[in-house]
Amino acid sequence: MNRLHRTFNQGESAPRFTLNLLTLGLLLSSAVPVAHGANTELPATAVTAEDNAGYQADSAWVGGFEAAPLLDTPAAISVFTDALIKDQQARLLSDVLSNDASVGESYAPIGYYQNFVVRGFSLNSASSYKINGRTITGEQNVGLENKQQVELLKGLSGLQSGVSEPGGVVNYVTKRAADVRSVTVSTDDRGSGYLATDVGGWFGSEQQFGLRANFAHEDIHSYVEHANGQRDFAAVAFDWNISPDALLQLDVEYQNKEQRSVPGYQLLGGTELPHHASPKKLLAHQSGSKPVTIDSLNINGNFEYRFTDNWKGSLSASRSKVVIDDYSSFAWGCYGAASCAGSAVPNYFSPEGNYDIYDFRSPDDTRRNDEVQAALSGVFDTGGIGHELTVGSSAFRRVVDQRELINEMIGSGNIDSEPENFARYDGPVEDSYRRLDSRQYGLFFNDRISFNQQWQTVLGGREVLLDERTFDDQGDTSRHTRRYEFLPQAALIYKPVPNLSLYTRYSKGLALGGTAPWFASNAFETLAPTLSRQIEAGVKYDWRRISLSATLFQIRQDYQYARPDATAGAFTYVQQGEQKNTGLELAANGWASERLQVSASVTAIRARVTGSGTPEYEGHQTINVPTLRASLYGDYALPWFDGLALLGGVQYSGKKYASQQGGVQAGSYAIFNIGSRYSTRIEGYDTVFRLTVDNLFDKRYWRDVGEYMGDNYVFQGAPLTARLSASINF
């Protein structure tokens, strides 16, 4: 009834480090901190990026099938570099994506995996996240310690991803082998401890083997009471230059995280936001409740062979597996409140702030993505017209194994007080069985055609076969979807001068159908896949050391929602009408002056529903999508103090609706952040100290007021948080 989206478990947790991180941090901080990553260049045959010491990136993988200059890519792509991630001391994807004004959170509880909305459309954990271009299970908080950059393709990605949501796709690019030896320690104002190491180098008779290893341990002291946790992370990247024409790359990363998840609030009486809510309070706290344990393993490899100077082939494969042991004392609804007795579906808190407490359990909930792709790419001329052609094929499989969810109401609480401890569920736990087996097969091509130095067109498409089955607890097929769809993409690029690019693009996408919420007459039914279409026009300009861009877009997708029926309190989940989001994005990344670099973006979106058959859902902005959002982060190197830089910025969000009917609205807010970075040498070692203070004025605000699995939740933003780190490069 409440947490029917939750997932995964693994019986035993990973071994824990016993190092006293705070003690080590104090010792190191008295003598050392990190320098920006080593700038050691890989051999020419290694397809990879160097460590970037700035916020500006000139290329990305996510826009196509290999790394390409952003200026020549006809798509809106944001790249968040290793330097920016380090300066902001980011630990979660939400910390990184907050730098893009087109992104918002969409059910991202503390202690659980995060979900996002891009350009007003939610991403999908099954297909919207990648590592080195290969799809991973999104039900994990991917470690950032071994990531060179995080890329966000905004808008449709059917050519790159096949079946995917229209919001976009996130791609993590891993660090490659380099001569680096670094240690980072960190703590915060709540006493958290963090230790990370980054070690790499080249070896072999001809330095043909490269290795890079990243390890991290984190003791998490959350700003929410009773929600502390811990995390262990390990990653290895291996590069082998087999010959001048052959390259093999392998990546393996494992993470274990344990932390109590923090339930969101719900609307009081379904019509107003909670009053005087504290971001530090854990709703539905039960002293005997277990934490959520998430074990994730991501493996991917790529082999590339150059046949001639103009043609090369690649074969890549990946496996991503997540197991979540999901336990929660969950706050949801108000069946136990007298004031809710007259409601057929009281999936909100009572007007007085009462809520029901559920013992939710979903152990051994496992999701696995497997993918393989073969591609051939080359350059050639036909009649004086240049071609950069990529053709290939891919196969993708996703399976979900799950036990029957346990979701037992055990008592009630109130948002203004600590609930009493109630007797826990002590019944049986059913055996695990296969819930989903989804397969995609694709043939794709992408051709960049150059007519002259000014005009280019990019034509591409992917033929997709989606073959998906869901099963009941007896192992019988409950739904079988088999569908072919061609997903085209066409773009026109005009470059009047080499550093200025104007483009327009059309894309078509296919997304999985939504699943009906528990209270609908067709509960848990998964609807047919939906089509989406996008038109986009943009301008990109590289001026000196800064990249500027402006993008106009319009995305249309079939609208899916729980439609109110003629009978009071009755709903049917349907695809009816259309959601159309139209927006403008502005961005700037790089050096604005000799000493100031910035990462800035502004997004204005008009999101509307039409033709739904329910007038209350139309004529206003859609839920959880502000009309205006902005983000600014800066780094200013002080001229009178060598090595010292001031950091900081502001994040702004306009008002946004917290209900589909538009009757409840969360206020606008602006969050100010400050910090500093000091780079020096201590005992001959490059050292960097970083201090960040987020939400400087301790602003109270609603960061997320969206809908998830049919229910509405509202989450408060983090209070003032200060973090200090010290890093040393040996």
Image (tube, rainbow, N blue to C red):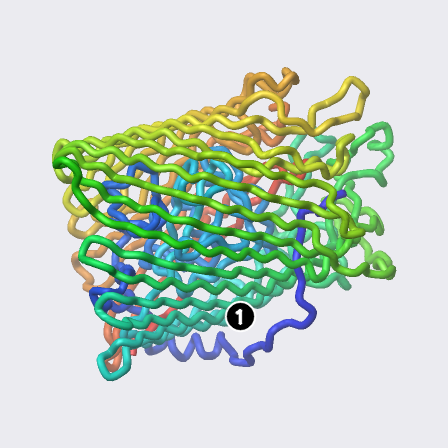
Residue in view at x 53 percent, y 65 percent: 297
Can residue 101 be seen in the rendering of this structure? no
Q: Residue furthest bottom?
A: 205
Determine the residue positioned at 79% across, 44% down: 356
Residue 500 vertical position relative to residue 251 in the rendered view, above or below:
above
- Position of the N terminus by quadrant: top right
98 or 2: which is nearer to us?
2
Q: Position of residue 71 (x, y in %)?
A: 23, 41
For the residue pair 84 and 392, the one nearer the viewer reads as: 392
Residue lying at 70% horizontally and 29% vertically, measured from the top left: 573
Instruction: Using residue 516 as the reference point, say whether residue 598 is left or right of it.
Output: left
137 with respect to 641 (left or right):
right
Q: Nearer the viewer, residue 627 or 68?
A: 68
| Residue indicated by mark 1 | 232
Asked if one can make out residue 60 in the rendered structure from this viewpoint, the answer is yes
Which quadrant of the structure image shows residue 588?
A: top left
x%, y% of residue 634?
30, 48
Q: Which residue is the extreme one toward the front?
A: 383
Horizontal and vertical percent position of residue 237? 39, 70
Q: Amino acid at mark 1?
A: Asp
